[in-house]
Amino acid sequence: MILDLDIGNTLSKWRLKDVISSEIRSRGAVWTREEWRPGADIPDLDVVSAVRISSVARRAVLEDTVALLQRRVGVVHVARSGREALGVTSGYEEPGRLGVDRWMGALAGYQLTGGCCSVDCGSAITIDFVLPGGRHLGGYIIPGLRLMKESLKLGTRNVAIDPDSEADELLAPGKNTVEAVNHGIYMAAVSAVNRIYAEVCDREGVALPLLLTGGDARVVSRGIRVPHAIWPDMVYAGLEACYPLTAAERAGKMAGAPHVPLPAPLERIRAGLAFSTLL
Ligand SMILES: Nc1ncnc2c1ncn2[C@@H]1O[C@H](COP(=O)(O)OP(=O)(O)O)[C@@H](O)[C@H]1O
Ligand SMILES: CC(C)(COP(=O)(O)O)[C@@H](O)C(=O)NCCC(=O)O
Ligand SMILES: [K+]
């Protein structure tokens, strides 16, 4: 089995992938803690022959995890952001400083679409752009839904936005504190994504496919008006593309890759932008 790890600031996600069949056998998540230790809630390492890791947690968390895994597993790949990979060149002045989860998402998105906007809705919401041809432009970082809510300190942190709510309900004015906070941060997040997507497509003169991932991808998706796809395994797909281990991966297949709808025509994106900024 291959153990893939996506260690974010909130959750450490894992999945076990069969080396022979390329099927995902199991998956789970544990809180990203100071001392991250395989335990009851972590897969059995005896069946693991290789590990691939994307981590944006504190360096000590990664070092501890890698040290522990290296004692038990023969092959441990730790992804790093770089200046160039798989046809994509980083837009960052210091490429090593780009969050590796963003880099994995950008690489996976580029493999799938040949140029896209990738949005990762986790602890932070990150919005990255890769143009056709492979130039990564850089991106945007805003607080995620949960962080925005916690920062208000209004005692609403444990009342999550129902991911099944209709966008229309979430966009309506709140009639109590919980609603006002939930609807406010939701509006802030989806407005930012909609606006940033339109601004950058307009600037660059290209309508890009739009991909969403992360723990809040589903709820954010409901407020996005332009065609897009959700790809829960997008960070894992970057690991697959960087460190292909199975026959399917070597053939360029990425697990769980969604059907990506054609983007809206550029004129429509521009008209929407003009409408939201000039009226
Ligand atoms: N079952 C869940 N447990 C925890 N967080 C969840 C859950 N479902 C959705 N979320 C949301 O997803 C976010 C974590 O998403 P994730 O992409 O794993 O973040 P990160 O990569 O930063 O750890 C949380 O901040 C929360 O808003
Ligand atoms: C922006 C992030 C905190 C997002 O992390 P996440 O929400 O996935 O936990 C992470 O990608 C990161 O630490 N990036 C380094 C800074 C940068 O990308 O510029
Ligand atoms: K994120």
Image (cartoon, rainbow, N blue to C red):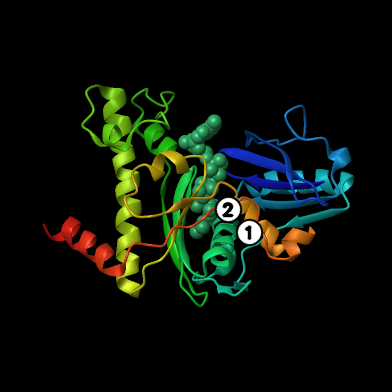
Q: How far from the left and from the top, in percent, is residue 127?
A: 43, 57
Q: Residue furthest left?
A: 279
* Mark 2 C-beta to ligand 1 under 8 Å: no
Q: Residue furthest bottom?
A: 133
Report if the CB atoms under discs 1 and 2 are less than 8 Å apart: yes
Q: Is residue 180 left or right of residue 10?
A: left
Vertical side of 22 occupied by 169: above or below: above
Crowding around mark 1 (Cα neighbors within 10 Å: few <14, some 14 to 19, many 20+) is many
Crowding around mark 2 (Cα neighbors within 10 Å: few <14, some 14 to 19, many 20+) is many
Quadrant into which the C terminus falls: bottom left
Vertical side of 78 occupied by 219: above or below: above
Question: Disc 1 on helix, strand or loop?
Answer: helix
Residues 76 and 206: in front is: 206
Q: How far from the left and from the top, in percent, is residue 14?
A: 69, 41
Vertical side of 128 occupied by 21: above or below: above
The residue singled out by tag 2 in the image is: 234
Q: Is residue 21 left or right of residue 198?
A: right
Residues 61 and 119: in front is: 119
Marking on residue 238: 1
- Give the quadrant of residue 144: top left
Residue shown at 51% from the left, 78% from the top = 133
Q: How far from the left and from the top, in percent, is residue 43?
A: 77, 35
Residue shown at 63% from the left, 56% from the top = 237
Vertical side of 199 occupied by 56: above or below: above
| Residue 163 in view | yes
* Amino acid type, residue under disc 2 in the picture: Met
Question: Disc 2 on helix, strand or loop?
Answer: helix
Q: How far from the left and from the top, in percent, is residue 223?
A: 33, 44
* Amino acid type, residue under disc 1 in the picture: Gly
